[in-house]
C-alpha cells in the first residue's frame, strides 16, 4: 500500500521577526498582499511600499503567462509543442523559454548530466502527481532513461528554436520555472518602484529590499522532518532568493520505502545519497532553484565543493540531522534547532543594515 504526500510549499518559512507580519511601523505604508494558485502551487506576493492592486495584477498576469508556456502540467504549452515535434523539426519559442533552456543546458553541462532538462520521460513514468503512485516497472524506467540526454537538445539562437533530436523526448523545466518566475516578478516590482516586498512562489522565496523595520529579512529554513513552519535555522537576507529542495516535497511511501521527486538520471530512481534537503541563497531565484536541485544530486561532499566554487550560500541537511554549510552562508545563517548539529563552524555576526543594491 502506498502513502502519498504533497508538501510543495514547505521549503522555507517566514518568521515573526524583522518586521515580517508584525505591526507596521508608524508612518509606513500598509502592506498589500495577494495569494493565488498558479505554476501548480500557491503563490503569494506581499508589497510593503508602492502597494497597488495594479502592480499585483501585472505580476500575476506574468506568472500565468510563464505557466502557460513552460509548465509540464498545462496542456498546449510551448514545451508540449517542442515535444510533439521531437525527432521531426525545430519549434520556434519565446525569448523567456529560450532563456530558461539555455540556463538548463548550462547546469546540465556543469553537472555532466546529473541535472538534465530532458528528464521529462522519466518523470512521466514515475507519475509523482498521481493519486496512487507506484514504483514503475524496470523495463519502463530503462526505456525512459534512454530518452534522457541533454546533449540531444539543439538551440538555434538566431531562429529562436528548440529541437529535440529523438522522438518521445520531453523537456521538463520544473527545476527552474518557479525561480525564473520569481525573478520576473522582482523585475516588475523594481521597475514599478517597489523597494520592499516578499515573493513566495510555493516556498521559493525572494526577499526584496529591507523589512518595514528597516532590517534584514529573517527567513526560516524548514526542518525537513516536520510540518510547515518548523524551522531548523534562520537566514538574514536582502535582495536574495532562499530556495530549498528536499525529499519531503513530493513523495510517496511504498512498502516502507520513500520515493521522492528528485531523480538520479544515472539510475532512473530517486536520488539516494543521505541528504534530506538543500537550501541555496543567491541573488537570482532561478540560480537558487536550479542549483538547489543540482547540488542535491551531487551529494554532500561534491555539492559543497561546487557551491564554494560558484560562490553560493548553501545549507545541506542529511538523515543524521547534520547540517553542512558553505563559507558564503556563514555571515547570515544561524542554527536554532538543538536537534540538529552544525558540522562546520559558522561565525555568528550581528545584524547589519541591508545594502541598497537593486535586484
Image (tube, grey):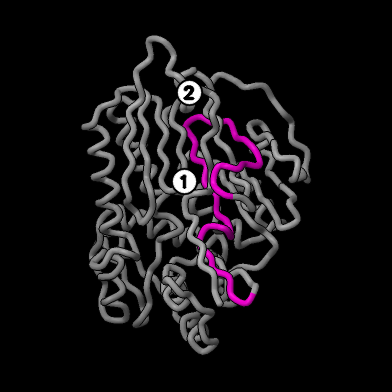
Q: Label 2 belongs to which residue?
A: 22
Where are the magenta residues, as a range?
Answer: 227-255
In the displayed structure, 279 sits above or below 333; it is below
Is any part of residue 87 visible from this angle? yes
Q: Residue at x 38, y 68 (%)?
A: 171
Label ID, residue 320: none
The image quadrant that residue 56 belongs to is top left
Q: Residue at x 39, y 44 (%)?
A: 182
Label ID, residue 204: 1
User: What is the crowding at mark 1: few (fewer than 14 residues within 10 Å), some, or many (at least 20)?
Assistant: many
Q: Give the image location of residue 266, x and y in percent.
A: 58, 75
Q: Is residue 241 magenta?
A: yes
The residues tagged by marks 2 and 1 sit, at their Cα atoms, a distance apart of: 21 Å
Label 2 element class: loop
Q: Residue at x 74, y 45 (%)?
A: 340
Q: Give the image location of residue 102, x and y in percent.
A: 40, 58
**Residue 153 placement, left or right of 231:** left
Q: Nearer the viewer, mark 2 or mark 1?
A: 2
Q: Is residue 125 magenta?
A: no
Amino acid at each position: 500500500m502506498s502513502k502519498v504526500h504533497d508538501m510543495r510549499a514547505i521549503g522555507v518559512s517566514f518568521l515573526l521577526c524583522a518586521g515580517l507580519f508584525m505591526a507596521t511601523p508608524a508612518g509606513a505604508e500598509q502592506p498589500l498582499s495577494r495569494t493565488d494558485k498558479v505554476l501548480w502551487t500557491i503563490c503569494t506576493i506581499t508589497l510593503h511600499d508602492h502597494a497597488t492592486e495594479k502592480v499585483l495584477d501585472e505580476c500575476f498576469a506574468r506568472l500565468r503567462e510563464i505557466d502557460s508556456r513552460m509548465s509540464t502540467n498545462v496542456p498546449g504549452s510551448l514545451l508540449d509543442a517542442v515535444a510533439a515535434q521531437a525527432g521531426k523539426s525545430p519549434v520556434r519559442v519565446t525569448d523567456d523559454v529560450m532563456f530558461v533552456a539555455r540556463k538548463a543546458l548550462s547546469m546540465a553541462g556543469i553537472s555532466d548530466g546529473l541535472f538534465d532538462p530532458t528528464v521529462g520521460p522519466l518523470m512521466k513514468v514515475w507519475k509523482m502527481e498521481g493519486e496512487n503512485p507506484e514504483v514503475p516497472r524496470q523495463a519502463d524506467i530503462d526505456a525512459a532513461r534512454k530518452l534522457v540526454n541533454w546533449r540531444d537538445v539543439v538551440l538555434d539562437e538566431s531562429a529562436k528554436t528548440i529541437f529535440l533530436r529523438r522522438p518521445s523526448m520531453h523537456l521538463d523545466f520544473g527545476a527552474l520555472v518557479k525561480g525564473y518566475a520569481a525573478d520576473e516578478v522582482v523585475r516588475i516590482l523594481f521597475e514599478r518602484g517597489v523597494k520592499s516586498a516578499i515573493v513566495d512562489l510555493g516556498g521559493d522565496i525572494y526577499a526584496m529590499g529591507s523589512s518595514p523595520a528597516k532590517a534584514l529579512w529573517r527567513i526560516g529554513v524548514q526542518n525537513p522532518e516536520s510540518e510547515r513552519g518548523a524551522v531548523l535555522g534562520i537566514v538574514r537576507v536582502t535582495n536574495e532568493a532562499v530556495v530549498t529542495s528536499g525529499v519531503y516535497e513530493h513523495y510517496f511511501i511504498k512498502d516502507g520505502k520513500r520515493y521522492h521527486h528528485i531523480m538520479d538520471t544515472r539510475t532512473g530512481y530517486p536520488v539516494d545519497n543521505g541528504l534530506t534537503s538543500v537550501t541555496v541563497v543567491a541573488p537570482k531565484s532561478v540560480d537558487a532553484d536550479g542549483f538547489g536541485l543540482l547540488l542535491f544530486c551531487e551529494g554532500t561532499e561534491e555539492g559543497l565543493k561546487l557551491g564554494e566554487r560558484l560562490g553560493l550560500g548553501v545549507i545541506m541537511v542529511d538523515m543524521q540531522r547534520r547540517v553542512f554549510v558553505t563559507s558564503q552562508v556563514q555571515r547570515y545563517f544561524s542554527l536554532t534547532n538543538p536537534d540538529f548539529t552544525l558540522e562546520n563552524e559558522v561565525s555568528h555576526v550581528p545584524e547589519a543594515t541591508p545594502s541598497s543594491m537593486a535586484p
